Image (cartoon, helix red, strand yellow):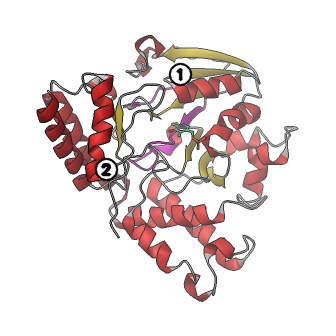
Amino acid sequence: MARIYNFSAGPAMLPEEVLKETAEEMLDYHGSGMSVMEMSHRSKIFQQIIDEAEADLRELVGIPDNYRVLFLQGGATLQFGMIPMNLMTVNKKADYIHTGVWTKKAIADAKLFGEVRVVASSEDKKFSYIPNVKNIKFNKDSDYVYMCDNNTIYGTKFKEYPDTGDIPLICDMSSCFLSEPIDVKKFGMIYAGAQKNVGPAGVTIIIIRDDLVARTNELPLPAYLKYALHCENGSMYNTPPTYGIYICGKVFKWLLRTGGLEARKKLNEEKAKVLYDYLDSSSFYKTSVVPEARSLMNVTFKTPSEELDALFLEEVKKYKYTNLKGHRSTGGLRASIYNAMPKAGVEALVKFMKEFEEAHK
Ligand SMILES: *Cc1c(COP(=O)(O)O)cnc(C)c1O
């Protein structure tokens, strides 16, 4: 069996240790005689799995007691709608920072429920930078401010967060969650689809402050779409994504035993530096992202032509490094180097990139 370097933006690589552990437990989890996949979510043994996952996540991130943790389904995409439905419910107005496709979708959904004010945008330069958060003027009557931290498609990342005062800040962290420490109390709500950096597709992790949950108590919403109801039921109003939660729990333990989020950030910086240093030294490859906004998770670049981009993808097949094609909306190439990508994987990619440059410059 040979594992290969998978540079997919998501679903993405998982730590090999985690895959091995779960493989060992596949047929008989801890003497239960069954797989976690086959367990009732109402069983004691599964309750222990979800409780431990939450406790480990709280320890890993340092989540304060006045925040709830939810494990839901529907992807990050369901949150685009649930957020305004639940939280744009006081003045029915919210401020959005627009940094790409994911905020565009969130804005479109929010417009169904109230007034959206786009208070900053990087659309003028094809989302190749992050607006200066110090210059943004927020509207005092906003029910929340919304942003997307790491823009998976372009490879941009906020390096500081806006100061929104008393207005809750809501953040889509799908593609950078657990890649670095998080100061949770800066945010009203943080959420992330698991399949980028945390676990398998099908789990969305939500960290939401009590006062925001309280906004949703009396809302006439379908049951599944209401945060209060999920909180009251410990993410078990209905069947949660049980197997996915179990794997996320394993990843939290892996992060805890490998030094936590400070150590992980350092590693991620080292990994990304290998790639960015090479891109900066090369006159063959170009990245359109400004240096101040470079993502540690998704590195986008292009060769001198679309034909060479295509040839790059063809030739890299001989090494079986995979999923290096850029997003369909941007073209070009993209290497996603989430937590589970070893540094050796990035070094191997750069080695190939040098070979390719030498052969085609
Ligand atoms: C992938 C992604 C999404 C969409 O996630 P789904 O789970 O497919 O709904 C949203 N936001 C960001 C930042 C993403 O990277």
Query: Where is mark 2, residue-wise?
Result: 321
Q: Residue furthest right?
A: 220
For mark 1, what is the residue?
A: 97
Residue at (33, 64) in percent of width and height: 258
Residue 111 x %, y %? 71, 21
Image point 40% across, 65% down: which residue?
Answer: 254
Magenta residues span 156-184
Q: Residues within 10 Å of mark 2 (few under 14, many from 20)?
A: many
Q: Nearer the viewer, residue 292 or 324?
A: 324
| Callout in the foreground (2, 1) | 2
- Tell me whether circle 2 and circle 1 mark residues in contact (CB < 8 Å): no
- Give percent across and percent down for residue 122: 45, 17
Mark 1, Cα crowd under 10 Å, few <14 / some 14-19 / many 20+, is many
Q: In the current view of this chain or complex, which residue is farthest to the top?
A: 124
> Mark 2 vs mark 1: which is more N-terminal?
1
Which amino acid type is shown beneath numbered disc 1? Ile
